[in-house]
Amino acid sequence: MISFYYAKPSLFSRPVWITLLEKGLEFEPIAVNMAKDGQFTPEFRALNPFCRIPVLVDNGFRVTESQAIMDYLDTKYPQPPLLPKAAEPLALVRMVQMVSINELMPAIGELLMQKSGQQAYAKNRGVTALTLFAELLGEASYFGGEQLSLADIMAGVLVPIVCELGLDLKPHPHLQSWLDQLMARESWQQTQLSTAEKDRFLRSIRALARLWQKRRQQRAEQLLNPSP
């Protein structure tokens, strides 16, 4: 049995959740309440010492880090395949995944936190990523060709967020069409935050960031100065 530890607002949890649904796998969803320090409990730290969500446990085998979980699921449960086999489309899919994580995700964090002096840089990162995505997608239905891939899942979770935070897909009409078809899929609909959930998330994001900084400092002090 697959156990999936997640938090619905988590942008790292949702791609794994969508992957599970697209694979048609049976799993036990276990919600971790980040607002109440659920990721810092001893029980969760035993699953992931970095206190990060999500975590997947498959018949006793534990996997952390969202991209590793998605790779594991596609290899262990290969139907339907979410990674192309040929070198060029596989490289394209990996590029989109990495740009999503390394550029879009930090841009979203900076835009959400509204840090003075960083908004222009964050928007530039987002615009550059979207422009590259439009170029890589071309006229194809999906980044891997004509079949949904892990790149579509990862980017398809983050692109709507940056658009809600002020970026625009009008210069990239085919990218908008790509996003529309993803958001119409049942897996996107099922994992989408409601308006009320989204509002609560946006209100709490700054408090959560301060909490994470505090917890990380406490954890660092524990590691540097272990109890006798």
Image (cartoon, helix red, strand yellow):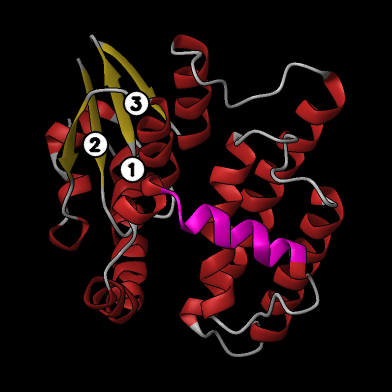
Which is nearer the eye, 195 or 180? 180
Say which residue appears at 28% left-offset and 80% top-offset: 199
* Residue underneath mark 1: 53
What residue is at 52 percent from the left and 79 percent from the top? 164
Helix, strand or loop at disc 3? loop
Residue 144: x and y in percent read: 72, 34
The spot of residue 169 in percent (x, y) is 70, 75
Q: Are marks 1 and 2 in contact (CB under 8 Å)?
A: yes
In the image, which disc is placed on residue 24? 3
Residue 5: mark in rendering: 2
182 falls in the magenta region: yes
Q: Is residue 153 above or below residue 122?
A: above
Q: Are marks 3 and 2 in contact (CB under 8 Å)?
A: no
Task: Give the quadrant of the N terminus.
Answer: top left
Q: Quadrant of the C terminus?
A: top left
Crowding at label 3, few (<14), some or many (≥20) Cα neighbours within 10 Å?
A: few
Q: Position of residue 95 (x, y in %)?
A: 76, 40
Mark 1: amino acid: Ile
- How far, Cα to Cα, is label 1 from label 3? 22 Å
Query: Label 2 is placed on what type of residue?
Result: Tyr
For the record, the magenta segment spans: 174-185
Work out whether residue 168 or residue 125 is closer to the camera in this orientation and state it: 168
| Label 1 secondary element | loop
Disc 1 residue crowd, few under 14, some 14–19, many 20+, Cα 10 Å: many
Going from N to C along the chain, the mark reached first, 1 or 2, is: 2
